[in-house]
Image: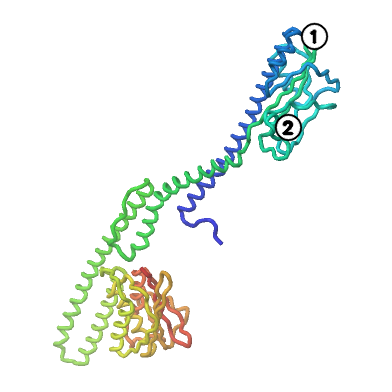
């Protein structure tokens, strides 16, 4: 099964959307990652500054004022106490802990003994990432616990991840200040947001890109339609020379080509008319002069040669006009048309048996199509027998007419060569049977002028089958 579109519109639109989605996905991921990292740095800096400020206040307060100050400073998300001893087991040696201590010392401007006992990350699964050796001081209560809600990490907790930080600092007078700080992390629901943003982006860009690409490719489709119909109708209106520069130049080149072809066909038609007149005039004079000849036998031979010459001229002119008929195309009832052609063939001794029918009229030039069919039927009568089979079948876009004779047929290697002008197979197409070797060439030229094709094939049981295909329009 083909997945990728075959049209230029579909391929350009798919390439635009695929590249855009890939670029935006990577961009959003990098942006969210940087945002998370920046948020963590900002929250860490804010926590260090807050804790350093509390330490400075407590350090410079008198022992009598410290209890009152601690009570005032115990505001979530930070809690302070002087009741716990210095934990001799030591603190964390992680990079985060060392960076946090360095930041506090930088804010304080002095090198006080300090240790981080715990940096605990609580998520929905209550996974603890880092612990200090020994006893872990309990984290401070959160607002949802005071309100009776479940603590972070408990079953059913659906809030953002929480970071519990516990540390100690020795003040210059030997007092130990223990601080606990809770850092709620922001919700990183980037998959949902990214999906929503991408969906909005894809829909909006798809609509805009679809409109733009359709606007660019529509002239190309018109150009293709005009090119495919040019052989059948040189009088079709010219293409609009608008749109992007490349498309406008292509339309200009096509219109120029159409004008040149029309001039060429008109010039050739005038030349053919002149040749027809100039050749037949001497033949007519010769016939008039033959009437004065006393030798009747000589007169009959000359008359035969002149008749043959006249037929050759007529056939040659018909062949040259076959692909460039000025006859207008009409909507033709093919069933009635074939009946009329078969009646004409009955007058010359051919018995045509017709099978099948066309479901709708076709666009064709009646006189040219009649000549094509008459040439094929006359060949079947001459080189086969008076009994001829004709059948009509159709598909979604093509109509096929098969004409079968019961003659001797011809070798498969010769079935294409006989369409060349003046080619006759002497073994089966003897000279006395008439013809100039242009009948099939004229028939194929007419078929191709209609946008169809003509081919020969062996008939089952002997004989030859001429297959004429025409477009359904």
The reply to whether the C-beta atoms of the residues labelled 2 and 1 are less than 8 Å apart is no
- Disc number at residue 453? none
User: Can residue 93 be seen by looking at this rendering?
Assistant: no
CA neighbours of label 2 inside 10 A, class few (<14), some (14 to 19), many (20+): many
Name the colouring of the figure.
Answer: rainbow
Residue 394 or residue 341, whichever sits in front: 394
Residue 292 in the image, given as x and y percentages of width and height: 13, 87
Residue 396 or residue 460, whichever sits in front: 396
Q: Give the Cα separation between the discs numbered 2 and 1.
A: 33 Å
Q: Residue at x 77, y 13 (%)?
A: 112
Q: Is residue 282 left or right of residue 234?
A: left
Tell me the residue that label 2 is attached to: 121
Residue sitting at the far front: 148
Q: Quadrant of the rendered structure where residue 310 is?
A: bottom left
Residue 74 in the image, given as x and y percentages of width and height: 70, 19
Residue 319 in the image, given as x and y percentages of width and height: 31, 73
Q: Quadrant of the C terminus?
A: bottom left
In primary-sequence order, the first of circles 2 and 1 is 2
Q: Is residue 369 above or below residue 386?
A: above
Q: Is residue 201 above or below residue 172?
A: below
Q: Residue at x 73, y 32 (%)?
A: 121
Q: Residue at x 37, y 62 (%)?
A: 228
Tell me the residue that label 1 is attached to: 173
Q: Quadrant of the rendered structure where residue 297 is?
A: bottom left
Residue 192 or residue 470, whichever sits in front: 192
Residue 229 in the image, given as x and y percentages of width and height: 35, 63
Q: Quadrant of the rendered structure where residue 171 is?
A: top right
Q: Element type at marker 2?
A: strand
């Amino acid at each position: 099964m083909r997945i990728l579109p075959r049209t230029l519109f579909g391929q350009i639109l798919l390439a635009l959307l695929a590249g855009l989605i890939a670029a935006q996905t990577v961009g959003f991921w990098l942006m969210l990652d940087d945002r998370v990292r920046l948020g963590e740095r900002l929250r860490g800096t804010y926590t260090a500054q807050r804790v350093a400020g509390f330490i400075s206040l407590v350090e410079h307060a008198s022992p009598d004022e410290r209890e009152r100050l601690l009570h005032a400073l115990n505001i979530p998300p930070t809690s302070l106490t002087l009741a716990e001893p210095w934990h001799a087991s030591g603190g964390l040696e992680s990079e985060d802990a060392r960076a946090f201590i360095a930041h506090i010392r930088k804010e304080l401007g002095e090198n006080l003994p300090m240790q981080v006992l715990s940096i605990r990350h609580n998520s929905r699964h209550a996974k603890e990432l880092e612990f200090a050796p020994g006893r872990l001081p309990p984290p401070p209560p959160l607002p949802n616990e005071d309100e009776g809600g479940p603590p972070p990490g408990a079953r059913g907790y659906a809030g953002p991840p929480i970071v519990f930080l516990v540390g100690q600092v020795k003040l210059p007078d030997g007092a130990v200040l223990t601080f606990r700080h809770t850092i709620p992390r922001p919700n990183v629901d980037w998959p949902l947001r990214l999906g929503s943003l991408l969906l909005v982006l894809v829909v909006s860009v798809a609509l805009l890109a679809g409109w733009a690409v359709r606007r660019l490719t529509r002239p190309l489709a018109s150009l293709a339609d005009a090119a495919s119909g040019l052989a059948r109708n040189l009088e079709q209106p010219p293409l609009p020379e608008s749109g992007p520069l490349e498309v406008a130049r292509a339309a200009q080149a096509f219109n120029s080509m159409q004008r040149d072809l029309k001039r060429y066909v008109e010039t050739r038609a005038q030349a053919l008319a002149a040749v027809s007149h100039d050749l037949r005039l001497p033949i007519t004079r010769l016939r008039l002069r033959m009437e004065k000849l006393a030798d009747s036998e000589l007169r009959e031979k000359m008359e035969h040669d002149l008749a043959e010459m006249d037929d050759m001229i007529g056939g040659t002119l018909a062949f040259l006009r076959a692909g460039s008929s000025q006859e207008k195309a009409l909507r033709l009832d093919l069933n009635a048309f074939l009946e009329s052609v078969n009646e004409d063939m009955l007058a010359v001794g051919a018995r045509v048996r017709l099978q099948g029918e066309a479901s709708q009229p076709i666009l064709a030039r009646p006189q040219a199509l009649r000549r094509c069919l008459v040439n094929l039927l006359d060949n079947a009568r001459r080189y086969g027998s008076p009994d001829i089979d004709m059948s009509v079948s159709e598909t979604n876009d093509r109509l096929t007419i098969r004409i079968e004779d019961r003659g001797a047929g011809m070798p498969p290697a010769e079935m294409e060569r006989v369409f060349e002008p003046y080619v006759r197979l002497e073994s089966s197409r003897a000279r006395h049977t008439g013809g100039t070797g242009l009948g099939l060439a004229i028939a194929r030229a007419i078929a191709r002028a209609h946008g169809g094709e003509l081919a020969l094939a062996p008939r089952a049981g002997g004989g030859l089958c001429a297959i004429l295909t025409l477009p359904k329009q």
